[in-house]
Amino acid sequence: MSSTPETVPPETVMVADPDPLTLDPISRSALALFAGASGDHNPIHIDIDFARSAGFDDVFAHGMLSMAYLGRVLTGWLPQERIRSYGVRFAVVTPLGAKPTCSGTIVAIEDGLATLDLLVQLEDGTVTLSGTATVELAPEVEQGR
Amino acid sequence: MPLEPARAMAMVFGRGTFEVDRGRLRLFAAAIGERDPVYTDLTAARAQGHPDLPVPPTFFLTMENETHGLRFLADLDVDMGAVLHGEQHFAYRSMVHAGDQIDIQPRIADVYSKRANTLDFLVKETDFTRGDELVAQSKTVMVIVNRDGGAS
């Protein structure tokens, strides 16, 4: 029944880009939950009165929430112990109701390590976060490349 | 109020200790929509070779939030409404699991201004150790927006 040719080398599968992840629209309750779970209690993310007093129209999402969502793209792709480094720049704040999509693209493979460019984008194309990760490939991939 | 660079660089942080517990990891997984059972179910975690529930990649900052938090910004007279998270980086040496006791040691690595002092940048670097073993390091860049144009 299986039509997968047995000649497909495993590394071809192993080095495919991770699957992108699209999240539900950011809600106030998601931010309240993340504030408690993450220990980031900055009122700018949960208290509209405070956000307005600071010059914002409304509360906005924690940058670390987007980074955690994006981290799920990595950990859903390979075992977490293979992640050597993971870093991001927060470009603009993520407003309430925004629907982020997280993605990663392999840009280099060297010495058994893959470098990925990472992105979180909103539906209108706004890039809220860009980053990089370095991951260890499985030993057979290193051999295969 | 603009950041005072000398005062910020002179900031000394005590070492904090965070005990990783399963309940907090499950709460964190729920908050980030993590559905992979390896992060919430002990049997699934052990089946993947973990001694207990693993700490996910960004949870290190949560540990630091609990031991140190953003109190240092208040100590520097920085208005929380003017603070943005500019960058966050992690380097990983070893997996951390529920049951581990992690020592957390932040330090201010750099302070600088841009755009005619309207933006102050504060760079904090943190070591995470388990006993004598360095398990992870983080670098946080905070941006402080001086809406008054920056007086410093």
Image: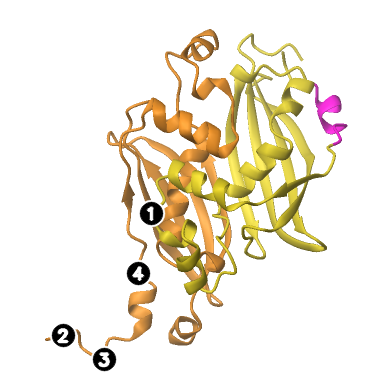
In depth, the one of B34 and A119 nearer the eye is B34
Residue drawn at (88%, 32%) of the image: B10
Could you tell me which chain the residue with mark 3 belongs to?
A
Chain B colour in the picture: yellow
Residue A16: mark in rendering: 4
Give left or right: position of B82 versus B103.
Answer: left
Answer with the quarter of the image where residue A77 lies.
Answer: bottom left
The residue at which mark 1 appears reads as: B35
Q: Amino acid at mark 1?
A: Arg
Q: Earlier in the sequence, mark 3 or mark 4?
A: 3
Residue A2: mark in rendering: 2
Q: Amino acid at mark 2?
A: Ser
The residue at which mark 3 appears reads as: A7
Count neighbours of disc 1 (C-alpha within 10 A) and say few if under 14, some if 14 to 19, many if 20 or more. Answer: few
Q: Is residue B6 magenta?
A: yes
**Residue A93 at least partly seen:** no
Could you tell me which chain the residue with mark 4 belongs to?
A
Residue B91: mark in rendering: none
